[in-house]
Amino acid sequence: MPLTARRLVLAAVVLAGLTALLVVLDSVRETPSRLSARGGELHGVYSVIHADGGRFDDTYTPVVMHDGTLVTSTNLHIAPGSQVTLRNDALVSHSLAASTALGTRKLLIVPVVWGSRTIQGTQASDRSFGNGPLASWYKSASYGQFSWSASATPRVKITAPTGSSVGTWLGQVQSRANTKISALGYRPGNYSAVLYEVPALIGGAAGYGMVPGRYAWVKTPLNIRVAAHELGHTLGLYHAHADECGNSSMQGTSDATMAASCFSVNHECGASTGTANASCWGEYGDPFAAMGESWMQMSGKAPNAGSFDAPEKAQLGWVSAANGRQQTVTQSGDYPISGYEDSAHTAPQAVKITTPNGTLWFEYRTWTGIDSVFQSYFGAFVNGGGFTFPNSVLVHIDHPVNGGGDLGSLLIDTTASSTGISQACSANGLASLPGFCDAGLLNGQRFIDFRHLVVEPMYDAGAGQEYLHVVFDSTGPNVSGMTATPADGST
């Protein structure tokens, strides 16, 4: 199938872009209309909802969540996660605190049905999933620094949600389910996150999650690839995008350069303003991240997800200078780096470098632990099977500018040419942007931010250690006094 046609098919099936703006207002007991009429105040957290899959791509539905009811509101034009105070529907004040996810948080899973529709989950199976595969995935991804402690309610039956408004539809599921479980003694406000397992979702989505916030909605059956993704949204993570730099060469030769457009992408691949060979970004383009494409592309092969990427883990506090898992590099040198998936580490696992073009993150993927799925996933399709997926260094741009205020990271395709891995991805439909299957830098290859930076991965066999050879280069050579036409043999 041609690449453009494949993109259209995938977009119709799985691409997401819906964002619905929310204010979560759990502390006030009066209705918004009464508060507005008497000049009262509402306090809450401004959030966004992402829809994953279905027909609502890149649309916005402003709403206010108040005591489990979604009410139409206006876009407050502030950062999601901000603590807000509203008076007469107007923004009075707001503040944004750093968001981390450390320790153990309480998760409530609510199996919900309506009409003749049913789900696979039960109270016992949902509790087992939350405390088993889901908790284990988060514990592994966070190097043991974060996990969920899950409870589950009995299955509840509600009146079927109706309407064409995403906010209203989700609000009906939430408020009606909350009414039922409250009667059973469960208090949603006592949990850091509430996940509703439902038989279907408006627009055909696989899931919805607040960014950041308390609530997520997932279509039955529960599995890691969707649940880890939606709960990642509740922790404040956006999608893990990909940056296609067009025809610019990214590595392999001494004169390879990175186009400036790699740092300023402003349209999605396949849009009318760009072509397959032009710089563009892919909403789910990172095939190795749970917040990117791995959460959905494995659906027919393995219900799993790759780890969160380095800028995402830094946002959650899982890699930091304080715990020794992150290092900020500001001068030339050779810097050891440990395998990204390793729980124990002898060197930092994420290297952060800032240039005038932006902030870059480097992570050395060894495809072990929760990332081992890629060995079987991609290896089975390359060279007829039995292929060993190579260790490589993934490069991400932190918080790109794509015109929508999205704070999701961008994976850079550092391999300009087509390889057996990317060809297998294309032939088997393993990724909407197959070129990113071989996005990582191999040892001896160079990543070049032209006039600013050169990074080359290398391995010291004697020490058994991977290194990043970093050279900062912002000035040209000094050519003063050089002879214009040197004689043959001159130095």
Image (spheres, helix red, strand yellow):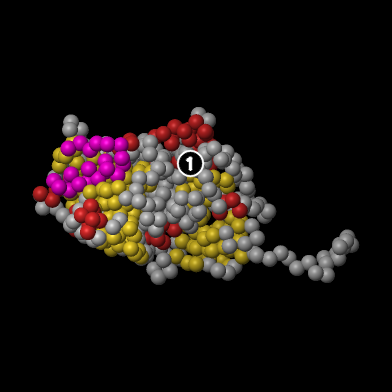
x and y percentages locating residue 50 in the rendered image: 36, 47
Indicate the position of residue 122 as horizontal and vertical percent values: 17, 42
188 part of magenta stretch? no
Q: Residue at x 32, y 50 (%)?
A: 73
Q: Amino acid at mark 1?
A: Phe
The residue drawn where x is 39% and y is 34% is 13
Query: Where residue 84 appears, x then y in whole percent?
Result: 32, 61
Exactly how many numbered labels are in the figure? 1
- Residue under the point 15% across and 47% down: 179
Q: Is residue 85 above or below residue 437?
A: below
Front position in the image: 328 or 424: 328
Left or right placement of residue 461 versus residue 450 in this view: left
Q: Is residue 460 in view?
A: no
Residue at image location 44% in from the left, 44% down from the top: 284
Left or right of 92, for residue 244: right
Report which residue position mark 1 lands on: 387
Q: Main secondary structure of the magenta part?
A: helix
Question: Which of these two is toward me, 392 or 407?
Answer: 407
Residues drawn in magenta: 159-180
Is residue 163 shown in magenta? Answer: yes
281 is higher (above) or lower (below) than 55: below
Q: Is residue 23 above or below residue 162?
A: below
Q: Residue furthest front?
A: 37
Within 10 Å of the Cα at label 1, are there few (<14), some (14-19), or many (20+) other Cα atoms?
some
Give the image quarter of residue 333. bottom right
Q: Which secondary structure, mark 1?
A: loop
- On the image, the x and y values in percent for residue 346 come to 43, 66
Quadrant of the rendering where the C terminus is positioned: bottom right
Residue lying furthest top = 1
Q: Nearer the viewer, residue 32 or 161?
A: 32
User: Viewed as shown, does residue 78 lie left or right of 351?
Assistant: left
